[in-house]
Image: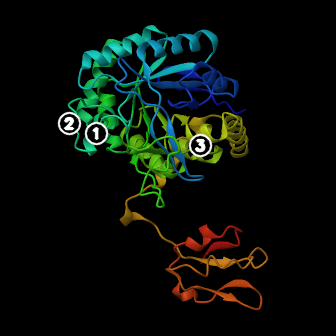
Amino acid sequence: MVNLNVNFAGLELKNPFIAASSELTDEFDKIRWAEDFGASAICTKLAFLEVPFYARPYHIFEKGGGFYSPSGHRLGVEEAQELIRKTKEQTDLKVIANMMGPGENLDGWVKLAQMLEEAGSDMVELNMSCPNVGLMAKKMNVDVTDELGAHLGKNPTLAREVCRAISDGITIPVMAKMTPEGPCDVVAEGCQQGGAAAVSGINCPMSLPGCDIYDGGKPLYPSTHNQSFAGICGPWIRPLAFRHVAQMRMKCPDLPIAGGGGISNWQQSVQMVMYGATVLTYCTLFYTDGYKALPKIEKGMREWMEEMGHETLDDFRNIALEHIVTPQKVDYFDAYPVIDEEKCNGCKVCVDLGHCEVMSFDEKSKKAHVQLKDKCYMCGVCYWLCKRKAITMEAV
């Protein structure tokens, strides 16, 4: 019998599915959708004691790739408190309050956390990772004295002290959100030493989308005249998320981890758990597909667990880590491409590779063939590019 229940740093969750802090969670009606479609918890949108500057959402979305988000709606503490109270009163969701204190003012961080706890939050998530606050200014050589966002998350000593101050000042669990702009594993260890009950990762790395080549390099955003550097999320960052979650798990074996970053289906959700995640967070997927994507993930995961004989997430959590080694310890074996001519449609994708001369195209049969096997160095690129799955790599 499959059981998706999970204890996450003291929070008893009916499943591991959490809506990440974003415009998905800045208003109660959208939060209620999360519950309607099966989420166990939500991270409310980033809250400040005082919102540092006006911002509204503006995005560029490249299908199957990147979701560029330079800015967004941020909550003042009173607005966040009201949202938390309403969510706790009218739903059964666990509420994780995403927050950012005023720079190096530890008293301000503690005060904000206390106010969110008083409103009913079950956990606070310390935003040490937003690339659009603090780090952007540093990158542009703007004088910023406060340590904010991803700039804070790159400093394990400061991150530890912020976690320590807040952990000592509130009674609910503290979670720190990691940035891929820094060494997540080292920072996570510092946060754990400072009393953090959990970490989450990853937030968006800083990026810059393309520009309008027909209009003087102006931004492609349809609702702004200029642009700032952008956080990027979505499928492009998933390999980064896998890497950082795995490294954090290796560094901190007992630390609960909320793993997310470009997860788009149930298979990738399983992979994230195999790399060490305790629970899973979703953002871009819900932007593009809506919360209706969540029941599909739950169904797929349940059916796979039944097929594999797993009863709980613990049965397969961390199992992918045993296969990660340093480059000099990679264990190679010989495997060459074999083409199924019935599946091959003659698209030539495997023939036209710039680095490979193994494949040839038969004009008579209109099929690809393995012609120069001795030239193959078994990289597997043709295998991955074949949309018809006509190529297999067979061991010798």
Tell me residue 226's x, y (percent).
41, 44
**Residue at x 34% of width, y 29% of height:** 192
How many neighbours does mark 3 have within 10 angstroms: few (below 14), some (14-19), or many (20 or more)? many
Tell me residue 164's x, y (percent).
28, 21
Q: Amino acid at mark 3?
A: Ser
**Earlier sequence position, callout 1 versus callout 3:** 1
Q: Horizontally, is 364 left or right of 119 in the view? A: right
Above-or-below relation of 357 to 84? below
Q: CA distance from mark 1 to mark 3?
A: 34 Å
Residues marked 2 and 1 touching at CB (< 8 Å): yes
Above-or-below relation of 240 to 347? above
Q: Horizontally, is 54 left or right of 386 in the view? A: left
Above-or-below relation of 343 to 91? below
Q: CA distance from mark 2 to mark 1?
A: 7 Å
Disc 1 or disc 3, which is closer to the eye? 1
Residues marked 2 and 3 touching at CB (< 8 Å): no
Query: Which residue bears the numbered disc 1?
Result: 137
Q: Horizontally, is 323 left or right of 292 in the view? A: left
